[in-house]
Structures are given as structure tokens and as C-alpha cells.
Image (cartoon, rainbow, N blue to C red):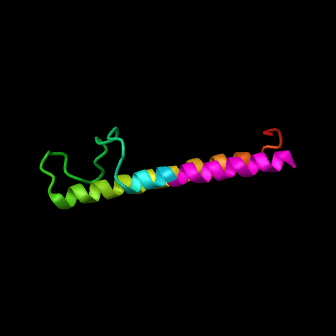
Amino acid sequence: MEENEKKLRLTAQLASEEHDEHREIEAGNLDDEDDNDDGSLDSDDSYNENELAVKAERKKERALITLGRKYASIKKAVDEDKMLF
């Protein structure tokens, strides 16, 4: 019974952390480490407002997809690992 309680607490904590990170990404608080990945945008520095908005939206989408995979993997490991608790 204690094992199930620990699992439930961990699952709730993971859900809370995922929600917090999701909210941070939606708020636009992304690291600028991959700004060199311009995709199909021109390689010169003359981005217009539209291009910058598209670039930011793509970056946000990639971050949300990565976040979803990250937490799905962690949740799967918690659910399947019999030795965890």
C-alpha cells in the first residue's frame, strides 16, 4: 500500500512539474541556445516581424513536443519499473 502512495505522489509531482514547464514555455521563457537553427528563413539578419513570429512559434512548438516526450518517458518508467519502490 505504501508503494502505491509513493507512486501516486510521484505521479502528481511529475504532473505538476510538467504543467509548470508547459506554462513557462507558453509564456515565451525559452532558452536562446538554438537560435542558429533558422529552418527555412533567410540566412541574412533582415528578419521582418512575420519571420520572427514564425521562428518563435516553431521554437515553442519544438519545446512543447520535447517536453511531452520527456514526461511521457518518465511516467512510463515509473509505471513499468517494478523495482522503483
Q: Which residue is drawn at 28% across and 54% down?
A: 55
Q: Nearer the viewer, residue 54 or 24?
A: 24
Q: Position of residue 9 (x, y in %)?
A: 71, 49
Q: Residue at x 47, y 54 (%)?
A: 22
Q: Position of residue 15 (x, y in %)?
A: 60, 54
Q: Residue at x 55, y 48 (%)?
A: 17
Q: Can residue 77 be seen in this view?
A: yes
Name the quarter where the C terminus is drawn. Answer: top right
Q: Is residue 69 visible?
A: no
State which region is magenta: 1-19
Q: Position of residue 54 (x, y in %)?
A: 27, 59
Residue 3, magenta (yes or no)? yes
User: Quick one: which residue is furthest to the left in this view?
Assistant: 46
Q: Nearer the viewer, residue 69 or 37?
A: 69
Q: Where is residue 81 in the image (x, y as percent from the top left)?
A: 78, 43
Most common secondary structure along the magenta stretch: helix
Q: Nearer the viewer, residue 53 or 1?
A: 1
Instruction: Decide if residue 39 is on the left or right side of residue 44.
Output: right
